[in-house]
Amino acid sequence: MADKQLPRVGVVKMASCDGCQLTLLDLEDELVAIGQRFDLVEFPEATSSRSSGPYDVLLVEGSISTPEQLEQIVELRARTKLLVTIGACATSGGIQAMRNWSNEPEWRASVYPHPEYVDSLATATPVADHVQVDAELRGCPIDGRQLVELLTALRLGRRPQLPDEAVCNECKRKGRVCVLVASDLPCLGPVTATGCGALCPGYDRACYACFGPKDQPNVASLAQWMGGSRTPQQVDRLFAMFNGYAPAFRDAAQRAVPVMQPVPRPRRPKATTKGKAS
Amino acid sequence: MVMSAPPGATFLPRERFDALLDLLREGGRTVIGPTLRDGAVMLGEIATAADLPAGWRDVQAPGSYRLSDGNGPRLFDVVNGPQSWKQFTFPPRIPVATARREGTDSSFAPIAPDPPRLAFLGVRACELAALGVQDRVLAGGTYVDEDYRARRESSIVVAVECTRAGANCFCASMGTGPEVRSGHDLVLTEVEDGFVVSSGSPAGDRLLSRLPGPRATAAQIAAASGAVAATRAAMGDDAVAAEGLRDRLMDKLDSPRWAEVADRCLACANCTMVCPTCFCSSTDVHSDLDGTVNVAEREWDSCFNIGFAKVAGGNFRPNRSDRYRQWLTHKFATWHDQFGSSGCVGCGRCITWCPVGIDVREELAAIAPPAIPVGRIPPRPAAATTGRFDVATLREVHSETDDTKTLRLTPGDPALLGGQPGQFVMVEQPGFPAFPISCSRYGTESLFLTVRGAGPATAALINTPISGEVGLRGPLGRPWPIDRALGRDVVVVAGGIGLAPLRPLIDALIADRDRFGSILLAYGARTPGDQLFRDELISWTKAGIEVVQIVDRSGPGWTGRVGVVTNLLDQRDFTRRASVAFVVGPERMMQATTRVLRDGGIPAERIFVSLERHMECGIGLCGHCQMGPFFICKDGPVFSLTELGDLFSREGI
């Protein structure tokens, strides 16, 4: 398959759960066709054959969370023509970006028995904070159809059609009943970029903005309206999710995060009878 | 050829409704109508009458929709849900064309329309008007949307006249309903035990001639038209001042209001998606990885979406305010120029389904107010005519303060008991000039007037002996617009005797307590001894009203706050659920209060005041109470601050 004519594609990850990469592997109907048209030179999730570049297209998952990743992303950028971030972590920092407003050493100490072994940055930040990003796929995880559209557009040399409109558009097209208006659920659809196919409201759930803010989201107005039946803290916490560090959600998320304090790690009881230690 | 006379109306008993469905289904048609799904009335297949939402009703408010089970047999008491018939005539997403590329060859082919054969059941008058609008837009010009035309031509339209209006309905204002006049094949009007069915087209004639059932009786036909007339009366026809709106709106392209509404607007496109006339779409091409097989799909788009007016060099409508203005001015103004009618049919969906409850009626009134105020002025009883007073008997007197008493009177004319909160009566006593007094309560048999003996005539009135008679004329004037407060937080502010005209409003809020958000009553009086209705202040608290009080000067036993009424308000945030305020008191107090309310986030069009002026005739003939463009007696006394504009805080007007 290593045809020199095919675009060389890499898929790499930073701090993330691998779910977005799995979306590519889950494209069962298209995967063979994609494999025939792109040379997947680097994709540790799928193949043990590796390549350090150069890449025509690099799909980057995850946020920049360690000094090592910071060096790595700069190097990768230099070896890449088109860098595409995939998913909420790479695009806006992800759930781990909540540590950006906390005392990171304190949290680390509350989680790990030997925090000194962990070499992490005080912040988890989007890839675009460090290097130029050419395109982004939103979502936690990304949407398979959008990924195929991106690859198709890359191949045909056109712009990918990634709509920047509220989730509400898709809810209405699909004939769904608005869970905000009809059930007062705390739905963030009106300020969230579509692309998911309006998944959650189709299951009578409120959108929790895993695709992040749409362009010009009116967060203040929606928050104020939702405040009619919720406390300000309840409203703020809605935004402290996968895209809480996205600039449009950041103020609300930041207000919500300080109330989430680390729980001191319980000291392990000293081993007595069963332990190896003397 | 001899034309046969159109068949008359048929009566279809409710238990025989399936006979109509059988008839509509002939030839393989599918019947689409209102069904219950996911907490709303949605359009879906109707196999039997049991699929219809029997007994259900909807409760709509800006940004809110709930269903309630009325347990009755009536099939069409639920008015519009979020979906309109454009779901079927102009579907949200359809393939419209294909393209292929093989080597260097390209080929293109439109997809021929292949419409399903549908019968639309339960099309309301506003919806018929909307179909008419879309007919003009999509099939009435030089270029025609073939798919739309084919879907329209292949469908049968069975209309239903509304015998109930939703709180956000304003078809009568837009001149589209509630009566069904044209555009239908059949029309049903639901009466007590069935439907009066008549035809509106040759296809409808054929269906009706085969519908089993007796001819509708004159009584049934009268009951049907009476029910629709009652719907019209309940809805009112002045929610939007449609006449001249085009010019008024286009004169206001620079209104500061566009920026204000953009602060609330989410640009989420819900209003345009639920609008039965919005027709904007985009066509995206989806291809395989090689670009060999391409399908163009048309889908609903919206002028609120940021990409809608984008070009390579930028965006023609970059701001939310631009996009809101675009939508409102197209819908209500330039639509006339392009398509010969308003683009709005008054269905109210954009109000209900706006996630933050933006109300076009309110925006239009604020941006392009009519020359005369918009409001519901109830029909006047005969007793309103100058000089014709009804004789009412004084039954009871209750002293409120040293100089103020509440009188309970039983009028001879029951129309006086049908007044609404905020209205007033003219009081006449032989030998004295007539004067206006706001009603302070409406009972089942009695009317209550709370009167301060400030002058000779009012002093005479409060000293009338029990069983004495006085002349009353009314009820007069424009009442408090209570429906504007549905689903919202309510702020009531009274200064001194200003609590009297607010008491019927408070009664009405308590009677329907569940339909409002929080209710705050802020009451200021000069001294504790000047407070009205002291016992009731406590009972109102028990009824779910937050009552806060203040006096200018303390007195014996007073442990509450001392100061002016605005002290009760200036630390509050009224923006949580788009509050509505009702204010009565001395004019200075109202000026100060409304300033604080506006600072607290209530926009001018949701602050209502009741103005006092010298009145003699009470019906806009004598000229005493004229203020700017208004006669306070007939155009008021209740006004929104928007209507008053800078007349309100001006002295010497």
Image (cartoon, rainbow, N blue to C red):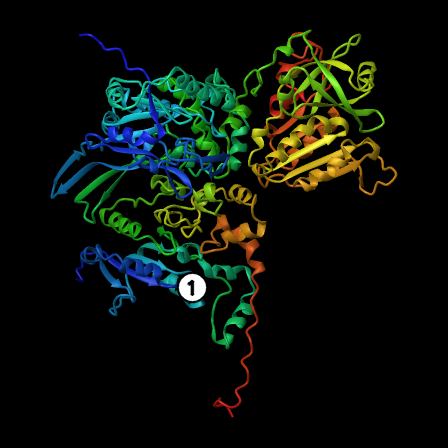
Residue positioned 81% across, 25% down in the render? B404
User: Hey, what amino acid is under mark 1?
Assistant: Leu
| Rendered position, B21 above or below B232 | below
Q: Classify residue A63 by image quadrant.
A: bottom left
Where, quadrant-wise, is the N terminus of chain B in this rendering? top left
Residue positioned 40% across, 57% down in the render? A90
Q: Position of residue A237 (x, y in %)?
A: 53, 54
Name the one closer to the observer, A60 or B267: B267
Residue that numbered label 1 is attached to: A70
Name the one closer to the observer, A192 or B531: B531
What is the count of numbered marks?
Answer: 1
Where, quadrant-wise, is the C terminus of chain B in this rendering? top right
Q: Residue furthest right?
A: B556
Q: Position of residue B398 (x, y in %)?
A: 79, 27
Name the one closer to the observer, B89 or A74: B89
- Residue B197 seen in render: yes
Circle 1 chain: A
Badge 1 crowding class, 10 Å Cα cut-off, few under 14, some 14 to 19, many 20 or more, is some
